Image (cartoon, grey):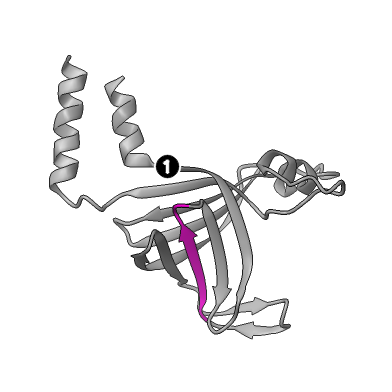
Amino acid sequence: MVKKLLGIVVLGLLLSGNAFAKQIVLKNCFNPGFDVYGKKLNFKSFLKNYNAGETIDSEILIDEIVRVDTNKKEIYHTILMKDRTGTGEKFKLLGFENDVFLGESYSKYAIDTSYGKEMLNRYIFVFINTNEVKFKFKDRKFYNHLECSGVGNSTLKSILKMLR
């Protein structure tokens, strides 16, 4: 009874503040494609193909995560390896329109290997309805596309968990 009352109070406080302030987490992101037999990859089969032959924990991929934090106005892209190290990039959240979050990298310098030259202004697009993430450089087509199998609102999930 007390937990439910506390949950209602917390939920009320959240809703009375910034109703749009939340974190959205997309997990199990991978580059879509097909295996050597022409079967469409899912996250599990992608990991199996990606990690084939790897024996060093720092080179074994376990997850790729994209998190949108509307409180801090940032988007985080993290690649997590088996030894719990990770690489990541932080983007400034520029806006939200038609269920798509747009972010610009804080790092203003990158090398686009497909064009063999340095590029500026790297952007991330997070498509909430389709669980997709796309990357591009200014004035270029999308060059990287990720499909994600999980999406969630961490604030709402934690409140629901507390009420159980």
Q: Residue at position x 15%, y 49% from top?
A: 17
Region rendered in magenta: 121-129
In the image, taking residue 135 as reference, residue 71 lies left or right, namely left
Circle 1 Cα neighbour tier, 10 Å, few/some/many (<14 / 14–19 / ≥20): some
Look at the image and tell me whether residue 82 can be seen: no
Q: Main secondary structure of the magenta part?
A: strand
Give the quadrant of the C terminus: top left
How far from the left and from the top, in percent, is residue 64?
A: 59, 49
What amino acid is at disc 1? Gly
Q: Residue at position x 16%, y 17% from top?
A: 2
Q: Is residue 163 above or below residue 80?
A: above
Secondary structure, mark 1, is strand
In the image, taking residue 93 as reference, residue 19 lies left or right, namely left
In the image, taking residue 101 as reference, residue 124 lies left or right, namely right
Q: Residue at position x 62%, y 61% from top?
A: 145
How far from the left and from the top, in percent, is residue 25?
A: 45, 47
> Which image quadrant is residue 71 in?
bottom left
Residue 115 drawn in magenta = no
Q: Is residue 68 above or below residue 56?
A: below
Front residue of 152 and 69:
152
How far from the left and from the top, in percent, is residue 47?
A: 72, 43
Front residue of 23 and 142:
142
Q: Is residue 5 above or below residue 114?
A: above
Identify residue for label 1: 152
> Which image quadrant is residue 146 in?
bottom right
Q: Residue at position x 17%, y 14% from top?
A: 1
Q: Is residue 161 above or below residue 136?
A: above
